[in-house]
């Protein structure tokens, strides 16, 4: 007799958007996923902080432009008060200030509202696992911004990065997601995540946005 299969751990998600016409259908759709529970819906940053304090919460799906406390400030506050909670931005806006502001505040993912359900659920799962997912449009804007900004002091990459870790960093710098890196290098996504975790730790890289910048500075992208 086979042993019962253990059910996957369900992720507890807060959906934040000031428009009920967006917030409520999005919460309903995400609730159909076998591993996601939408535990609260919020119309602004203050409601997000209240919902997270009542917790537990794993991920906040965060709109940026909300009345009162906006999504960037709420993301920053979450990083200070609840660093265990990951933030994935889902917004209409893909301008430089919004992207850099959100990522600088600590968001692990950034999607535009063109993203489909699979893209959103994938980003939520990745964020809960400590990984970053950026919309392709956001990746392209970020790459363009980094390349055109006035040069900052270059922080050298550590000598103990392996050749494979440098390859992975180069592909991050070119805008490839984990799946694209795995296909390019003929390895599994799990192995890609291991390489990313190792190189981030060795090079003191906080997030994917910084990884893109460091790859460009090092001439890898």
Image: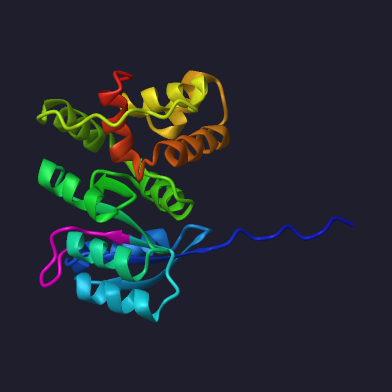
**Above or below 203: residue 89:** below
Q: How many marks?
A: 0
Which residue is nearer to you in this view: 34 or 54?
54
Towards the viewer: 89 or 2: 89
Q: In this view, does 176 lie above or below 200?
A: above
Q: Which residue is at a point 17% across and 51% down the rendered structure image?
A: 101
**Residue 119 among those drawn in magenta:** no
Tell me the residue at 26%/34% (across/down).
139
- In magenta, the rendered stretch is 61-70
Q: Residue visible at 35% across and 45% down? A: 206
Task: State whether residue 95 appears in this view.
Answer: no
Looking at the image, residue 183 sits to the left or right of residue 8; the answer is left
Spot occupied by residue 32 in the image (x, y as percentages of width and height)? 46, 60
- Residue name at image x 38 percent, y 64 percent: 83
Residue furthest out toward the right = 1
State which quadrant residue 94 falls in: top left
Between 59 and 100, the residue placed more toward the observer is 100
Q: Looking at the magenta stretch, what is its main secondary structure?
A: loop
Residue 31 locus on image (x, y percent): 43, 63
Could you tell whether 123 is left or right of 146 in the image? Answer: right
- Residue 71 horizontal/vertical position (percent): 20, 62
């Amino acid at each position: 007799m086979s042993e019962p299969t253990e059910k996957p751990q369900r992720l507890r998600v807060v959906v934040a958007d000031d428009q009920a016409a967006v917030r409520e259908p999005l919460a309903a759709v995400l609730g159909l996923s076998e591993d996601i529970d939408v535990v609260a819906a919020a119309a602004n940053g203050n409601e997000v902080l209240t919902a997270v304090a009542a917790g537990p919460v794993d991920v906040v799906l965060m709109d940026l432009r909300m009345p009162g406390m906006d999504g960037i400030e709420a993301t920053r506050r979450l990083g200070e008060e609840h660093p265990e909670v990951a933030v994935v931005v889902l917004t209409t806006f893909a301008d430089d200030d919004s992207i850099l502001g959100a990522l600088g505040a600590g968001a692990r993912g950034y999607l535009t509202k063109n993203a489909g359900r699979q893209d959103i659920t994938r980003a939520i799962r990745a964020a809960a696992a400590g990984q970053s997912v950026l919309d392709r449009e956001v990746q392209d804007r970020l790459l363009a911004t980094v390349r055109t900004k006035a040069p900052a002091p270059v922080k050298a990459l550590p000598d103990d990065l392996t050749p494979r870790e440098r390859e992975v960093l180069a592909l991050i710098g070119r805008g490839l997601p984990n799946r694209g890196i795995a296909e390019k290098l003929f390895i599994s996504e799990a192995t890609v995540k291991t390489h990313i975790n190792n190189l981030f730790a060795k090079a003191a890289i906080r997030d994917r946005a910084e990884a893109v910048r460091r790859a460009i500075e090092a001439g890898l992208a």
